Image (cartoon, rainbow, N blue to C red):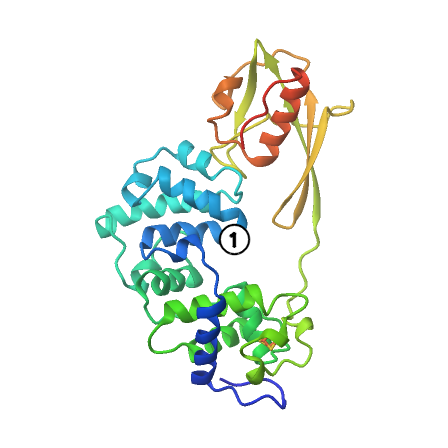
Amino acid sequence: MSASAESSARPLDDRQICRCLRRWFRLRGRDLPWRRTRDPYAILVSEFMLQQTQVATVAPYYERWLARFPDFTALDGAKESDVLHAWQGLGYYARARNLHAAARFVRENFGGQLPPATASIARLPGVGRYTAGAIASFAFDLPEPIVEANIGRVIARLTNWRAPIDSSTGQAHLWQTATALLPRKGAREHNSALMDLGALVCVPRRPRCGQCPLRQFCHAVQPELLPIKRKRPRTIQLFEPHTFAQRRNRVLLEQSSDRWRGMWILPRLARSPKEEPLLKIDFPFTHHRVTLAVFASRKAKRPNDKRRWFSRQALASLPLPSPHRRALALLLSVAEPGHTLLPN
Ligand code: SF4
């Protein structure tokens, strides 16, 4: 492995790094629910959930998901609305749809069992280079490198890489270094260890170099300034008006066909009314900051092929994106003080 700057650290010796890392991991590594299994389905579920979502948030969802859809066959046989409902609260629903599609793909192409071959795993919908390597190494212990945010940060610092890691050159450097570091045996433990080092010691703002098992090999000069990333696109503000219509204890909802395809949201308004909204909720979406503004409905609304009336009881089992779920809970609690808020 090469470092990008002169330094007094020892040359990067891949085998020694692996040994130090392994020793540290056996003492300090995290005990995560998805590390207690070798079931490729369970590991696939955890990897999909962990894309864009923190470990602490994922853990309860992971347990509930496996109780509800314990294997590829169960997930393949589920209705999309049930899959989206079970995913509710994790956001980025494309992951849930891909997971559902992956279950179908495994049934149609592999007879319901994921084969221990990275090329086959990489054919699943929603599975990129990182996820294929993660499933291959965590489920089957295949010698595959992985690079995600934690590992990328560790490698950028170890090698004092002072160019953007999200450029094609930066990505090539991270993957090449991860490949060079990979031991011939024990990829599962090695990849988990590198990840945990980034999550627990080589943390973003203030790396704990004094506790680091790789300190003697590290070439970072100002580790707190690494990794370098390209400038993010400017955050765009969006204002989205919706309406709240209630009739005889029922609420009118609309099935989304774009951002939250298949989920139920408060009906959209073509333009914003002049009056003040009943409430506003801000939420992030990719590089947007969205204001969901909900206005009182004045006219009687008719259901159509996209809009339907739902009883309050039915809301609990509907897939609703979090901002709309929050808005409905608030509106219904105001409409009827003491009314139980929608369950999470
Ligand atoms: S914690 Fe410090 S010594 Fe360890 S890899 Fe990160 S920057 Fe280097």
- From the Cβ of disc 1, is ligand 1 less than 8 Å away? no
Q: Residue 264: x and y, percent?
A: 52, 29
Identify the residue at the far left of this view: 111
Residue ID at (60%, 78%): 161
Q: With respect to residue 25, does 281 lie above or below?
A: above
Disc 1 is placed on an element classified as: helix
Name the foreground residue: 134 vs 19. Answer: 19
Name the foreground residue: 130 vs 89. Answer: 89
Q: Judge whether residue 38 can be spotted in this image.
A: yes
Q: With respect to residue 204, does 176 lie above or below?
A: below
Mark 1 highlights which residue? Answer: 55
The quadrant of the picture occupied by the C terminus is: top right
Residue ID at (68%, 66%): 205
Residue 143 placement, left or right of 207: left
Q: With respect to residue 130, does 70 lie above or below?
A: above
Name the foreground residue: 24 vs 47. Answer: 24
Residue 141 placement, left or right of 253: left
Residue ID at (44%, 36%): 86
Q: Judge whether residue 145 can be spotted in this image.
A: no
Crowding at dot 1, Cα within 10 Å, few <14 / some 14-19 / many 20+, comes out as some
Picture quarter containing residue 104? top left
Q: Residue 256: x and y, percent?
A: 52, 32
Q: With respect to residue 309, does 264 lie above or below?
A: below
Q: Residue 196: x and y, percent?
A: 51, 65
Picture quarter containing residue 162? bottom right
Identify the residue at the far front of this view: 27
Q: Residue 65: x and y, percent?
A: 40, 41
Q: What number of labels is visible?
A: 1
**Ligand 1 - quadrant of the structure image:** bottom right
User: The disc labelled 1 sits on which kind of residue?
Assistant: Val
